[in-house]
Amino acid sequence: MLKIGREKDPENILREEMLKERAEVLGRAGEKLAAAIDKMKNIEQGIDERLNRFHFMTEKYKERGGDKKVASLKQDMMSEINREIAKFNRAREYAKLRYYYLIVTREAMGMRRHHWVDEWYSIPPRKPLFRDI
């Protein structure tokens, strides 16, 4: 236990430095996980924007469904959306790995309860590939 109000002896200085280092390690693990989740959210916004454009384009050119240019454009847009979904799913796997590292770090530090970690760092589910409806 740290002695408050007394001169710090080498043991207390070392203990204080170890606690500080543990906090920094845990903080970095949490920051990396948060950054990974933010990246997923940014990719997801891009997917949503592309889906909105796809649906707008589909409705606007519904009567021209047999038009080869429209069909080709739809196919290109679907491919682009699916590339972004694959990117999202890769980012999700990376976030899951960062989550694992955070839990392992917490366990190594003697922390055994992780229920709040699930609430704080919620990783969205995997996205299925887009198929035209």
Image (spheres, rainbow, N blue to C red):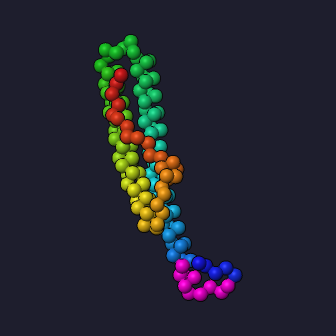
Res. 29 in view: no
Res. 128 in view: yes
Q: Where is residue 80 in the image (x, y as percent from the top left)?
A: 35, 35
Residue located 45% across and 23% down the image: 56
Q: How many marks?
A: 0
- Span shown in magenta: 6-15
- Quadrant placement of the C terminus: top left
86 or 69: which is nearer to us?
A: 86
Q: Position of residue 82 (x, y in %)?
A: 34, 35
Residue placed furthest toward the top: 63
Residue located 59% across and 78% down the image: 1
In the displayed structure, does residue 129 sit left or right of residue 51? left
Residue located 67% across and 79% down the image: 4
Residue 28 position (above or below residue 44): below
Residue located 41% across and 61% down the image: 104
Q: Position of residue 14 (x, y in %)?
A: 53, 81
111 or 127: which is nearer to us?
A: 111
25 or 64: which is nearer to us?
A: 25
Decide whether residue 88 is among the magenta residues: no
Residue 1 position (above or below residue 30): below
In the displayed structure, does residue 72 sit left or right of residue 115? left
